[in-house]
Image (cartoon, grey):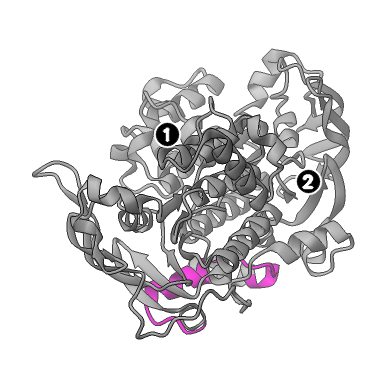
Amino acid sequence: MTAALVEVADLSITYPEGGVRAVDGLSFTLAPGRALGIVGESGSGKSTVAGALLDLHRGTGAQVSGTVRVDGLDVLAAPESHLRRLRGGTAAMIFQDPLSSLDPYYAVGDQIAEVHRVHRPDVSRRAARARAIEALERVGIADAARRSRSRPHEFSGGMRQRALIAMALACEPRLVIADEPTTALDVTVQAQILDLLHELRSERGMGLILVTHDLGVVAGSVDEVLVMRDGRAVEHGPVAEVLSAPRTAYTKELLAAVPRVDAVRERPAGPRTAPTDPPLLEATGLRREFGRRGARTTAVEDVSLIVRAGETLGLVGESGSGKTTVGRMLVRLLDPTAGTLRYRGQDLGAMGERALRPLRGELQMVFQDPVSSLNPRRSIGESVAEPLRAAGAGGDADIVRRARELLERVGLDPAWYHRYPHEFSGGQRQRVGIARALAPAPRLLVCDEPVSALDVTTQAQVLELLAGLRRELGLSMVFIAHDLAVVRAVSDRVAVLRAGRIVEEGPVDTVYDRPEHPYTKGLMAAVPVLDPQVAAGRRALRAVA
């Protein structure tokens, strides 16, 4: 019998500050060449377990007990010198956010070469650099020799994630731990990264532990799945069995919360408007350029769309397709380089700031990252109250009362008014962002990737919140996302963007069920599915193509 590559027995991890037990009596094994998916909601302990496999909690104050063995090494008892050989040499980790994992001051190739030299001290600088270029080529970076001299900010999100994978593979580890490696990526890049991990695992016989909140991701990428809740394993078994016949109510709830790209769902109906009614918002021939004269880049070209009262328009496309740029132009956070923008019949694009100010409250935006869009030094209640104060909406007592009402409306306890953003989960912070956007009583809400980093159950809660607000308030929405299943669940119509242009537009069910443009068909084919056999078939087709 082959010895296990990973053995975890009765692992418990407690954070003394607050007495939080993040992991409670967890046990599992992983054989060489096999892949295990660890799934669960935010706070279930997934990433904590991943860190324990390399003893990344050492020195943090966390209390760790139990047994963790990786390739025969007792990780929790090993001296630092052995751990240094383990980390990056025997086992490597791919973190969720490549931008914060890569040093912004150094070229990507130099960072990969440094990892190689740390674990292979006999290798020359020239040989290490050649190895770095080879690793970048292996993960699909075009013109790797030139791009190896680029810094992280010069790479797209997908390229940065590939660079992290190249760094992890530099010393040909026996185990790769991938912690949410595709969360912020669009569907086509996500499919490419998952295909790459599968191919490398097949070639090298390496083990893979894939940590994710997306059950669609694990369906086509792992052999077994372990479902975690509150630090415990609630279900563990072959991926096909767990996804097709879950035994626990919790796993069934997770599966039920996953948006399905092939499922027609009842969408919230806003106030009915006839096609002949004037649109609430109309954009014609929008173009947006960035850069200086002589080095201009066109991000959006000839985009025309309408949003009617009470409807939701979905904007989908890959990273860099221009979705966010279009959304920001619609609320005049960016000025169009060319084209016209009319709101309630008024020429919004031609207005100066003074004329535009009375309309600012009617056009609001919910941003993708509530951590960076909320002031960490301001309580959540004051963040919600800020737009009301700016508009002079009554006295202080009235503004505080209104802010508390808004917190309650989005499902937060009004008593939390004086708490700060770091005291909340990702889903709760996103609710704060929605409450702040609702404060000026908008008529149009532009939601820019509002659920992309949330687990499926929290995602479902935020989507239901938006649907309820649309019904109650008659909101119109532009919903920007790279998750096509989410867009189908909330939108009436959808526009597909590619390289700054709309390539297909229409009723969401028509576009999804009968896509006409090859690009739209490619997006649909890249969406993760919950059936492992279907996922494997799609992967095989992509490999042939």
SS at mark 1? Answer: helix
SS at mark 2? Answer: loop
| Numbered tag placed on residue 49 in the rendering | none
Which segment is the magenta one? 512-534
Magenta span includes 533: yes
- For the residues labelled 2 and 1, the Cα–Cα distance comes to 28 Å
| Numbered tag placed on residue 31 in the rendering | 2
- What residue appears at the point 43 percent right and 64 percent down from the top-left corner? 316
Name the N-terminal-most of marks 2 and 1. 2
264 relative position to 23: left or right: left
Circle 1 sits on which residue?
A: 132
Q: Can residue 91 be seen in this view?
A: no
Where 62 sits versus 289, above or below?
Answer: above
Closer-to-camera residue (66/136): 66
Closer-to-camera residue (292/6): 292
Quarter-of-image position of residue 108? top left
Look at label 1 and name its amino acid: Ala
Quarter-of-image position of residue 456? bottom right
